[in-house]
Image (tube, helix red, strand yellow):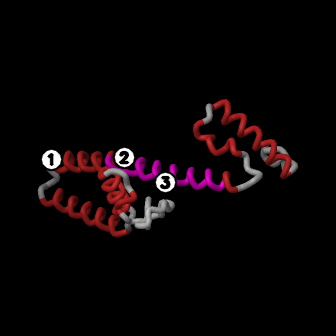
Amino acid sequence: MTSPTGAHRPTELRPIGEESRHATRGSRWTHRLGDATTHSNTSIGVLVALLVWIALGAAFDFPEWWSTTLFVATSAATLLMVFIVQHTQTRMEVATQRKLDELLRALPDADNHLIAAEAASDDELADIGELHLEARRSVIGADDGPDPT
């Protein structure tokens, strides 16, 4: 990002809710739906819609289309929410990983090999785990097993 004087300045963090934080229109809509479903009013709205749906079923003597429509709507909503949760959780995981990487870079005694641990093979992850298990045992002076008492 450049300023009017032409000097380069670091990218600024944008406040939560600013639409330009998402790269694509799909990401923006996914996050809008995700944000909307986290409000308590959404639960109340779903409860009211369910009560209205039950009242409609009772008024029409619970026809076959009533239950079929309910199953299709709940299945579609569940599938949509799976993708919304997956998208938002992946984005949050990436952001958290970048923050942890920055902390590792900032600490002089940190093991810099941990910065790329998410790209390590299963064997490398097991080796890292063993190294840290030994360090933890040396700090607490006990084994990692259950307390025998």
Q: CA distance from mark 3 to mark 2?
A: 14 Å
Q: Earlier in the sequence, mark 1 or mark 2?
A: 1
Which residue matches tag 2? 83
Task: Examine the structure image and report whether residue 96 is included in the region drawn in magenta.
Answer: yes
Residue at figure coordinates x 33%, y 59% from the top left: 32
> How many numbered marks have been drawn onto this rendered protein structure?
3
Query: Amino acid under label 1?
Result: Trp
SS at badge 2: helix
- Does the magenta portion include 122? no
Residue furthest out toward the right = 141
Please provide percent x and percent y for residue 9: 50, 62
Pick the front one: 104 or 124:
104
Residue 10 is marked as: none
* Magenta span: 80-103
Placement of the N terminus among the 4 image quadrants:
bottom left
- Cα–Cα gap, marks 1 and 2: 27 Å
Q: Nearer the viewer, mark 1 or mark 3?
A: 3
- Tell me the element at label 1: helix
Q: Earlier in the sequence, mark 3 or mark 2?
A: 2
Residue denoted by label 3: 92
- The kind of residue tagged 3 is Met
Q: Does dot 3 land on a helix, a strand or a loop?
A: helix
